Image: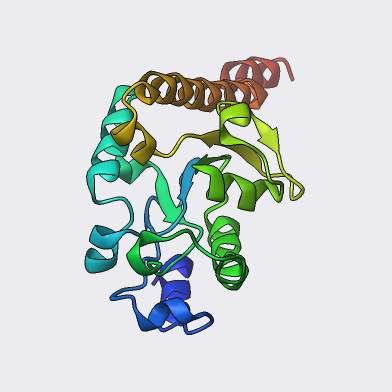
Amino acid sequence: MSELSDYYEQIKDCTRCQLYKSATNLVFGEGSETADLMFIGEAPGRNEDQQGRPFVGAAGQLLNDLLKEIGLKREDVYIGNIIKHRPPNNRDPLPDEIEACKPYLMKQIELIKPKIIATLGAHATRTMLEDKVSIGQVHGQTIKNKNGLTIIPIYHPAAALYNRSTIDVLKEDFASLRALLDKGKTEQKDQQPDSEDKYDQGALF
């Protein structure tokens, strides 16, 4: 059993806030446990609550499509939420609910060690930046939070379902994610010693 799976077993019966009383399932998260890119949404909706999986409704399908456009699949990234249980009637999560659940998310980040965290929507962005920022002002920007994590705020895919003009902005922000991932891989490759150089140097002695 992986560390992440073991951690799920530890928290799956969580009762730290009142949300568990009305929820069907705890939605832990899913994807690659060694992902370079991690998406963090707000909270599970009705479909997610029923299936125990994140982003499986219409917004999740749009997320899949956006990932496909930048050459990624759900299996390549990790997807989670600030809140693990669905708030009643999909209301916004309350501050005490966020505080109760946030340690779980931070532990997931610690175990996965993503290079980039894309926060989907205002609640996820404000939680990870610990600042009451406007998603409209910061989306697409690369920001280091107080813990040194690289955060890129992005509109929630659900926003594009209600306002189709947002889809173009989302596509641009996803293209920025791809560019940042590629930049990180190039820099990592440049830092590695050239095997041929090592061989040639060794041949001199």
Name the residue: 29% across, 42% down. 59
Q: Is residue 122 left or right of residue 128?
A: left
Name the residue: 46% across, 53% down. 42
The answer to whether any part of residue 72 appears in the image is: no
Name the residue: 37% across, 67% down. 86
Q: Position of residue 2 (x, y in %)?
A: 42, 67
Depicted 81 relative to depicted 115: above or below = below
Depicted 203 relative to depicted 18: above or below = above
Quarter location, residue 110: bottom right
Depicted 76 relative to depicted 188: above or below = below
Give the quarter of the figure containing the N terminus: bottom left
Q: Is residue 76 left or right of residue 4?
A: left
Q: Position of residue 28 (x, y in %)?
A: 40, 65
Give the quarter of the figure containing the C terminus: top right
Quarter location, residue 140: top right
Quarter location, residue 184: top right
Residue in the foreground of this view, choosing between 71 and 28:
28
Q: Position of residue 57 (x, y in %)?
A: 23, 49
Residue in the foreground of this view, choosing between 82 and 117:
82
Name the residue: 40% across, 80% down. 20
Q: Is residue 75 left or right of residue 106?
A: left
